[in-house]
Image (cartoon, grey):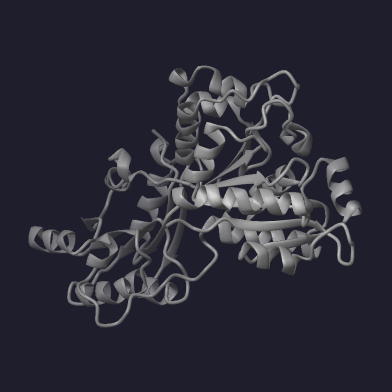
Amino acid sequence: MAYRLTIEAFCSGPDTAEALRAAALDRQLAKSRLSLAEGGLAAAIGHYADLPTPQVLVVEETDPALLRARLDQLAEVCVAGTKVVVIGPTNDIRLYRELMGKGVADYLPAPVAPRQLVDSLTGLFADPASAPRARVVACWGARGGTGSSTIAQNLAWAASRHLGEQVILIDLDLAFGTSILAFNLDAKQSVADALANPERLDEVLMDRCMAEYDDHLQVLAAPGDGRSRAAIAPDALEHMVELASRMAALVVLDIPHVWDQWSEAALAAADEVVITAIPDFACLRDTKMLLELLSPRRQGMVQPRLVLNRAENGRKAQLSAKDFAETLKVEPALVIPADPALFGEAATEARMLGEVAAGHKTSQSLAQLAAALSGKAAPPARKPSGGKGLFGWLRR
Protein backbone atom coordinates (compact mmCIF):
# COMPACT_ATOMS: atom_id res chain seq x y z
CA MET A 1 0.00 0.00 0.00
CA ALA A 2 1.30 3.47 -0.92
CA TYR A 3 0.68 6.07 1.77
CA ARG A 4 -0.10 9.67 0.84
CA LEU A 5 1.47 11.60 3.72
CA THR A 6 2.69 15.14 4.21
CA ILE A 7 5.99 14.84 6.08
CA GLU A 8 8.15 17.72 7.27
CA ALA A 9 11.51 16.98 8.88
CA PHE A 10 14.01 19.11 10.81
CA CYS A 11 17.37 17.36 10.87
CA SER A 12 20.49 18.10 12.89
CA GLY A 13 22.94 16.53 10.47
CA PRO A 14 23.38 15.40 6.85
CA ASP A 15 23.24 11.67 7.66
CA THR A 16 19.64 11.86 8.91
CA ALA A 17 18.62 14.04 5.95
CA GLU A 18 20.12 11.53 3.53
CA ALA A 19 18.32 8.65 5.25
CA LEU A 20 15.01 10.50 4.96
CA ARG A 21 15.57 11.17 1.24
CA ALA A 22 16.26 7.48 0.70
CA ALA A 23 13.17 6.51 2.70
CA ALA A 24 11.00 8.81 0.59
CA LEU A 25 11.94 6.75 -2.49
CA ASP A 26 10.45 3.59 -1.02
CA ARG A 27 7.30 2.43 -2.84
CA GLN A 28 5.25 2.73 0.36
CA LEU A 29 6.04 6.45 0.57
CA ALA A 30 6.22 7.15 -3.16
CA LYS A 31 3.00 9.21 -3.06
CA SER A 32 4.02 11.14 0.04
CA ARG A 33 5.48 14.64 0.11
CA LEU A 34 8.67 15.20 2.11
CA SER A 35 10.14 18.59 3.08
CA LEU A 36 13.56 18.77 4.73
CA ALA A 37 15.04 21.57 6.83
CA GLU A 38 18.11 22.01 8.99
CA GLY A 39 18.35 23.05 12.62
CA GLY A 40 16.73 20.11 14.36
CA LEU A 41 14.16 20.43 17.12
CA ALA A 42 15.06 24.04 17.97
CA ALA A 43 14.42 25.15 14.37
CA ALA A 44 11.07 23.34 14.32
CA ILE A 45 9.89 25.24 17.40
CA GLY A 46 10.61 28.59 15.77
CA HIS A 47 9.25 27.56 12.38
CA TYR A 48 5.84 26.48 13.66
CA ALA A 49 5.31 29.46 15.94
CA ASP A 50 3.16 31.01 13.19
CA LEU A 51 2.58 28.10 10.81
CA PRO A 52 0.46 24.94 11.04
CA THR A 53 2.25 21.69 11.73
CA PRO A 54 1.96 18.96 9.05
CA GLN A 55 0.40 15.52 9.13
CA VAL A 56 3.73 13.99 10.22
CA LEU A 57 6.60 15.91 11.81
CA VAL A 58 10.08 14.39 12.19
CA VAL A 59 12.46 16.23 14.53
CA GLU A 60 16.04 15.44 15.52
CA GLU A 61 17.78 16.44 18.76
CA THR A 62 21.45 15.71 19.49
CA ASP A 63 21.63 17.10 23.04
CA PRO A 64 20.03 14.71 25.58
CA ALA A 65 19.95 17.45 28.23
CA LEU A 66 17.72 19.65 26.03
CA LEU A 67 15.43 16.98 24.56
CA ARG A 68 12.60 17.08 27.11
CA ALA A 69 12.56 20.86 27.49
CA ARG A 70 12.45 21.43 23.74
CA LEU A 71 9.70 18.87 23.26
CA ASP A 72 7.66 20.79 25.83
CA GLN A 73 8.15 23.92 23.71
CA LEU A 74 7.18 22.06 20.52
CA ALA A 75 3.96 20.88 22.16
CA GLU A 76 2.96 24.54 22.60
CA VAL A 77 2.87 25.12 18.83
CA CYS A 78 1.80 21.68 17.57
CA VAL A 79 -1.62 21.28 15.96
CA ALA A 80 -3.77 18.51 17.43
CA GLY A 81 -3.54 15.41 15.25
CA THR A 82 0.05 15.91 14.11
CA LYS A 83 2.10 12.74 14.58
CA VAL A 84 5.57 13.56 15.92
CA VAL A 85 8.54 11.22 15.34
CA VAL A 86 11.62 12.08 17.42
CA ILE A 87 15.16 11.08 16.48
CA GLY A 88 17.30 11.31 19.60
CA PRO A 89 20.87 10.77 20.76
CA THR A 90 20.40 7.82 23.14
CA ASN A 91 19.10 4.27 22.88
CA ASP A 92 17.24 4.35 26.19
CA ILE A 93 14.14 2.21 26.75
CA ARG A 94 13.04 4.36 29.70
CA LEU A 95 13.18 7.50 27.57
CA TYR A 96 11.24 5.69 24.84
CA ARG A 97 8.48 4.68 27.24
CA GLU A 98 8.35 8.16 28.76
CA LEU A 99 7.91 9.82 25.36
CA MET A 100 5.36 7.25 24.21
CA GLY A 101 3.37 7.83 27.39
CA LYS A 102 3.31 11.56 26.71
CA GLY A 103 1.98 11.28 23.17
CA VAL A 104 5.05 11.19 20.90
CA ALA A 105 4.22 8.87 17.98
CA ASP A 106 7.64 7.19 17.79
CA TYR A 107 11.22 7.56 19.04
CA LEU A 108 14.25 6.41 17.02
CA PRO A 109 17.85 6.52 18.30
CA ALA A 110 20.40 8.00 15.92
CA PRO A 111 21.83 7.05 13.53
CA VAL A 112 18.74 5.98 11.59
CA ALA A 113 18.56 3.80 8.48
CA PRO A 114 16.09 4.40 5.62
CA ARG A 115 14.32 1.11 6.36
CA GLN A 116 13.79 2.13 9.99
CA LEU A 117 12.23 5.40 8.87
CA VAL A 118 9.92 3.71 6.35
CA ASP A 119 8.73 1.21 8.96
CA SER A 120 8.21 3.96 11.54
CA LEU A 121 6.32 6.34 9.23
CA THR A 122 4.07 3.70 7.68
CA GLY A 123 3.52 2.08 11.07
CA LEU A 124 1.86 5.29 12.28
CA PHE A 125 -1.07 4.51 9.98
CA ALA A 126 -1.02 0.70 9.95
CA ASP A 127 -4.41 0.65 11.67
CA PRO A 128 -7.04 1.47 8.98
CA ALA A 129 -8.91 3.54 11.55
CA SER A 130 -5.89 5.82 11.95
CA ALA A 131 -5.09 6.13 8.23
CA PRO A 132 -5.15 9.71 6.93
CA ARG A 133 -8.43 10.73 5.32
CA ALA A 134 -9.18 13.53 2.91
CA ARG A 135 -11.72 16.23 3.65
CA VAL A 136 -14.87 15.70 1.58
CA VAL A 137 -16.66 18.71 0.08
CA ALA A 138 -20.13 18.16 -1.41
CA CYS A 139 -21.34 20.77 -3.93
CA TRP A 140 -25.08 21.01 -4.63
CA GLY A 141 -27.18 23.45 -6.64
CA ALA A 142 -30.36 24.78 -5.04
CA ARG A 143 -31.93 24.35 -8.48
CA GLY A 144 -30.77 23.14 -11.86
CA GLY A 145 -28.77 25.73 -13.76
CA THR A 146 -27.34 27.62 -10.79
CA GLY A 147 -23.77 26.84 -11.86
CA SER A 148 -23.00 24.39 -9.08
CA SER A 149 -20.92 22.13 -11.35
CA THR A 150 -18.84 25.08 -12.51
CA ILE A 151 -18.26 26.10 -8.90
CA ALA A 152 -17.32 22.52 -7.92
CA GLN A 153 -14.85 22.23 -10.80
CA ASN A 154 -13.18 25.55 -10.06
CA LEU A 155 -13.02 24.85 -6.33
CA ALA A 156 -11.36 21.48 -6.96
CA TRP A 157 -8.81 23.07 -9.30
CA ALA A 158 -8.09 25.97 -6.93
CA ALA A 159 -7.77 23.65 -3.92
CA SER A 160 -5.23 21.51 -5.76
CA ARG A 161 -3.12 24.64 -6.27
CA HIS A 162 -3.51 25.74 -2.66
CA LEU A 163 -2.64 22.35 -1.18
CA GLY A 164 -0.02 21.28 -3.70
CA GLU A 165 -1.38 17.78 -3.11
CA GLN A 166 -3.79 15.42 -4.81
CA VAL A 167 -7.42 16.51 -5.19
CA ILE A 168 -10.14 14.28 -6.66
CA LEU A 169 -13.31 15.62 -8.28
CA ILE A 170 -16.16 13.09 -8.59
CA ASP A 171 -18.89 14.08 -11.06
CA LEU A 172 -22.10 12.34 -9.94
CA ASP A 173 -24.40 13.78 -12.62
CA LEU A 174 -24.30 10.53 -14.61
CA ALA A 175 -26.58 11.61 -17.44
CA PHE A 176 -25.58 15.24 -17.98
CA GLY A 177 -22.29 15.80 -16.14
CA THR A 178 -19.99 18.40 -17.68
CA SER A 179 -16.59 17.51 -16.20
CA ILE A 180 -15.33 15.94 -19.45
CA LEU A 181 -16.15 19.14 -21.36
CA ALA A 182 -14.99 21.53 -18.63
CA PHE A 183 -11.54 19.97 -18.37
CA ASN A 184 -11.31 18.75 -22.00
CA LEU A 185 -10.65 15.20 -20.84
CA ASP A 186 -10.31 11.96 -22.74
CA ALA A 187 -11.89 9.74 -20.09
CA LYS A 188 -11.99 6.11 -21.17
CA GLN A 189 -13.89 5.08 -18.04
CA SER A 190 -16.31 6.96 -15.84
CA VAL A 191 -17.93 7.11 -12.42
CA ALA A 192 -20.68 4.86 -13.83
CA ASP A 193 -18.07 2.16 -14.54
CA ALA A 194 -16.67 2.49 -11.03
CA LEU A 195 -20.13 2.16 -9.48
CA ALA A 196 -21.23 -0.72 -11.72
CA ASN A 197 -19.49 -3.37 -9.58
CA PRO A 198 -18.97 -1.85 -6.12
CA GLU A 199 -17.85 -5.18 -4.67
CA ARG A 200 -14.81 -5.08 -7.00
CA LEU A 201 -14.03 -1.42 -6.44
CA ASP A 202 -10.63 -0.80 -4.88
CA GLU A 203 -7.89 1.84 -5.16
CA VAL A 204 -6.43 0.24 -8.29
CA LEU A 205 -9.76 0.25 -10.13
CA MET A 206 -10.50 3.78 -8.91
CA ASP A 207 -7.17 4.95 -10.29
CA ARG A 208 -7.92 3.35 -13.67
CA CYS A 209 -11.31 5.05 -13.90
CA MET A 210 -9.98 8.52 -13.13
CA ALA A 211 -8.55 10.93 -15.69
CA GLU A 212 -5.62 13.19 -14.79
CA TYR A 213 -6.06 16.87 -15.51
CA ASP A 214 -2.60 17.75 -14.17
CA ASP A 215 -0.14 16.63 -11.51
CA HIS A 216 -2.49 17.49 -8.62
CA LEU A 217 -6.04 17.06 -9.94
CA GLN A 218 -7.77 13.83 -10.93
CA VAL A 219 -11.35 13.68 -12.22
CA LEU A 220 -13.74 10.76 -11.94
CA ALA A 221 -15.94 11.99 -14.77
CA ALA A 222 -19.58 11.32 -15.53
CA PRO A 223 -20.47 9.70 -18.87
CA GLY A 224 -22.65 12.71 -19.74
CA ASP A 225 -24.29 10.72 -22.54
CA GLY A 226 -27.91 11.28 -21.51
CA ARG A 227 -28.47 7.54 -21.17
CA SER A 228 -26.94 6.77 -17.78
CA ARG A 229 -29.47 6.92 -14.97
CA ALA A 230 -28.78 8.27 -11.50
CA ALA A 231 -29.69 5.01 -9.74
CA ILE A 232 -26.79 5.13 -7.30
CA ALA A 233 -26.71 2.80 -4.31
CA PRO A 234 -25.87 4.76 -1.13
CA ASP A 235 -23.54 2.00 0.11
CA ALA A 236 -21.66 1.93 -3.21
CA LEU A 237 -21.19 5.71 -3.18
CA GLU A 238 -20.05 5.66 0.44
CA HIS A 239 -17.46 3.01 -0.42
CA MET A 240 -16.25 5.05 -3.41
CA VAL A 241 -15.88 8.23 -1.36
CA GLU A 242 -14.05 6.28 1.35
CA LEU A 243 -11.57 4.96 -1.22
CA ALA A 244 -11.10 8.41 -2.75
CA SER A 245 -10.45 9.91 0.67
CA ARG A 246 -7.48 7.57 1.12
CA MET A 247 -6.04 8.60 -2.24
CA ALA A 248 -6.10 12.40 -1.96
CA ALA A 249 -5.92 15.36 0.38
CA LEU A 250 -9.35 16.66 -0.70
CA VAL A 251 -12.36 15.05 -2.42
CA VAL A 252 -14.96 17.27 -4.13
CA LEU A 253 -18.36 15.75 -4.96
CA ASP A 254 -20.38 17.39 -7.74
CA ILE A 255 -23.92 16.34 -6.78
CA PRO A 256 -26.70 17.07 -9.29
CA HIS A 257 -30.06 18.59 -8.34
CA VAL A 258 -31.49 15.16 -7.58
CA TRP A 259 -33.10 14.41 -4.23
CA ASP A 260 -32.60 10.74 -3.49
CA GLN A 261 -31.37 8.57 -0.67
CA TRP A 262 -27.79 8.64 -1.98
CA SER A 263 -27.62 12.39 -2.51
CA GLU A 264 -29.08 13.14 0.92
CA ALA A 265 -26.62 10.70 2.55
CA ALA A 266 -23.65 12.26 0.71
CA LEU A 267 -24.66 15.79 1.77
CA ALA A 268 -25.20 14.70 5.36
CA ALA A 269 -21.83 12.93 5.64
CA ALA A 270 -19.56 15.46 3.88
CA ASP A 271 -17.13 17.51 5.95
CA GLU A 272 -18.24 20.62 4.03
CA VAL A 273 -21.34 21.40 1.97
CA VAL A 274 -21.39 24.18 -0.63
CA ILE A 275 -24.85 25.24 -1.84
CA THR A 276 -24.91 27.28 -5.03
CA ALA A 277 -27.98 29.44 -5.59
CA ILE A 278 -29.15 32.28 -7.79
CA PRO A 279 -30.73 35.01 -5.63
CA ASP A 280 -34.35 34.43 -6.63
CA PHE A 281 -37.43 33.13 -4.81
CA ALA A 282 -37.25 29.57 -6.17
CA CYS A 283 -33.65 29.12 -5.01
CA LEU A 284 -34.48 30.75 -1.69
CA ARG A 285 -37.23 28.21 -1.07
CA ASP A 286 -35.08 25.21 -2.05
CA THR A 287 -32.04 26.38 -0.11
CA LYS A 288 -34.18 26.85 2.98
CA MET A 289 -35.66 23.39 2.48
CA LEU A 290 -32.21 21.77 2.17
CA LEU A 291 -30.87 23.51 5.26
CA GLU A 292 -33.87 22.35 7.28
CA LEU A 293 -33.54 18.76 6.02
CA LEU A 294 -29.80 18.57 6.69
CA SER A 295 -29.75 20.37 10.03
CA PRO A 296 -30.73 17.38 12.21
CA ARG A 297 -28.30 15.11 10.35
CA ARG A 298 -25.31 17.46 10.59
CA GLN A 299 -25.38 18.22 14.30
CA GLY A 300 -21.93 19.34 15.44
CA MET A 301 -20.64 19.65 11.86
CA VAL A 302 -19.75 22.75 9.87
CA GLN A 303 -22.76 24.71 8.65
CA PRO A 304 -23.26 24.54 4.85
CA ARG A 305 -21.63 27.40 2.95
CA LEU A 306 -23.76 29.45 0.57
CA VAL A 307 -22.51 30.72 -2.79
CA LEU A 308 -24.76 33.23 -4.55
CA ASN A 309 -24.03 33.02 -8.25
CA ARG A 310 -24.88 35.39 -11.12
CA ALA A 311 -25.96 38.13 -8.74
CA GLU A 312 -27.13 41.26 -10.59
CA ASN A 313 -27.49 44.43 -8.58
CA GLY A 314 -30.64 46.37 -9.33
CA ARG A 315 -32.36 43.59 -11.23
CA LYS A 316 -35.98 43.44 -10.08
CA ALA A 317 -36.33 39.74 -10.89
CA GLN A 318 -33.75 38.95 -8.20
CA LEU A 319 -33.50 39.35 -4.45
CA SER A 320 -30.57 41.24 -3.03
CA ALA A 321 -27.81 39.20 -1.42
CA LYS A 322 -28.68 40.90 1.86
CA ASP A 323 -32.37 39.89 1.69
CA PHE A 324 -31.41 36.32 0.73
CA ALA A 325 -29.00 36.06 3.66
CA GLU A 326 -31.34 37.63 6.22
CA THR A 327 -34.20 35.31 5.27
CA LEU A 328 -32.04 32.20 5.65
CA LYS A 329 -29.97 33.59 8.53
CA VAL A 330 -26.89 32.41 6.62
CA GLU A 331 -24.18 34.81 5.49
CA PRO A 332 -23.01 33.94 1.94
CA ALA A 333 -19.47 32.63 1.79
CA LEU A 334 -19.21 34.12 -1.69
CA VAL A 335 -21.29 36.38 -3.93
CA ILE A 336 -20.33 36.03 -7.61
CA PRO A 337 -21.59 38.78 -9.94
CA ALA A 338 -22.93 37.92 -13.38
CA ASP A 339 -20.00 37.88 -15.82
CA PRO A 340 -20.91 36.06 -19.06
CA ALA A 341 -17.64 37.07 -20.74
CA LEU A 342 -15.38 35.52 -18.08
CA PHE A 343 -17.35 32.29 -17.67
CA GLY A 344 -17.94 32.02 -21.41
CA GLU A 345 -14.24 32.31 -22.18
CA ALA A 346 -13.36 29.64 -19.62
CA ALA A 347 -16.04 27.28 -20.97
CA THR A 348 -15.02 27.84 -24.59
CA GLU A 349 -11.34 27.21 -23.87
CA ALA A 350 -12.09 24.28 -21.50
CA ARG A 351 -10.04 25.88 -18.75
CA MET A 352 -10.70 26.97 -15.20
CA LEU A 353 -11.32 30.59 -14.26
CA GLY A 354 -7.97 30.81 -12.48
CA GLU A 355 -6.24 29.70 -15.68
CA VAL A 356 -8.09 32.18 -17.87
CA ALA A 357 -7.92 35.19 -15.54
CA ALA A 358 -5.87 34.53 -12.40
CA GLY A 359 -6.08 38.15 -11.24
CA HIS A 360 -9.85 38.48 -11.67
CA LYS A 361 -11.74 39.13 -8.43
CA THR A 362 -14.00 36.08 -8.97
CA SER A 363 -10.98 33.79 -9.51
CA GLN A 364 -9.32 35.09 -6.37
CA SER A 365 -12.51 34.76 -4.32
CA LEU A 366 -12.95 31.14 -5.42
CA ALA A 367 -9.30 30.46 -4.52
CA GLN A 368 -9.89 31.87 -1.02
CA LEU A 369 -12.99 29.72 -0.57
CA ALA A 370 -11.10 26.64 -1.79
CA ALA A 371 -8.35 27.34 0.75
CA ALA A 372 -10.92 27.59 3.54
CA LEU A 373 -12.62 24.36 2.45
CA SER A 374 -9.28 22.56 2.45
CA GLY A 375 -9.06 23.12 6.20
CA LYS A 376 -5.50 24.40 5.90
CA ALA A 377 -6.13 28.10 5.45
CA ALA A 378 -6.34 29.39 9.02
CA PRO A 379 -3.37 29.50 11.43
CA PRO A 380 -3.40 26.69 14.00
CA ALA A 381 -5.12 27.13 17.32
CA ARG A 382 -2.61 27.51 20.12
CA LYS A 383 -2.61 25.40 23.23
CA PRO A 384 -3.72 27.49 26.23
CA SER A 385 -0.96 28.14 28.73
CA GLY A 386 -1.03 26.19 31.93
CA GLY A 387 -2.27 22.97 30.29
CA LYS A 388 -1.14 19.51 31.25
CA GLY A 389 1.62 17.38 29.96
CA LEU A 390 3.88 17.21 26.98
CA PHE A 391 1.88 15.80 24.09
CA GLY A 392 -1.07 14.44 26.04
CA TRP A 393 -3.35 17.10 24.58
CA LEU A 394 -2.68 15.70 21.08
CA ARG A 395 -4.78 12.69 22.02
CA ARG A 396 -7.78 14.93 22.50
Q: Residue furthest left?
A: 94
Out of 182 and 32, give the one closest to the viewer. 182
Q: Is residue 41 left or right of residue 95?
A: right
**In the image, residue 366 lies at what x, y percent?**
70, 58
Q: Is residue 282 left or right of residue 300?
A: right
Q: Is residue 34 left or right of residue 156?
A: left
Residue 118 seen in the figure = no
Q: Residue at x 51, y 23 (%)?
A: 205
| Placement of 130 over or under 316, stated as above or below | above
Q: Residue at x 61, y 26 (%)?
A: 191
- The number of callouts visible is 0
Out of 290 and 390, give the one closest to the viewer. 290
Q: Residue at x 32, y 64 (%)?
A: 59
**In the image, residue 345 lies at what x, y percent?**
89, 48
Quadrant position of the C terminus in the picture = bottom left
Q: Residue furthest bottom?
A: 386
| Placement of 393 over or under 232, stated as above or below | below
| Placement of 133 over or under 53, stated as above or below | above
Quadrant position of the N terminus in the picture = top left
**In the image, residue 94 lies at what x, y percent?**
8, 62
| Placement of 201 over or under 258, stated as above or below | above
**In the image, residue 339 lies at what x, y percent?**
87, 56
Out of 363 and 26, give the one closest to the viewer. 363
Quadrant in the picture for residue 76: bottom left
Residue 96 seen in the figure = yes
Q: Is residue 185 left or right of residue 293?
A: right
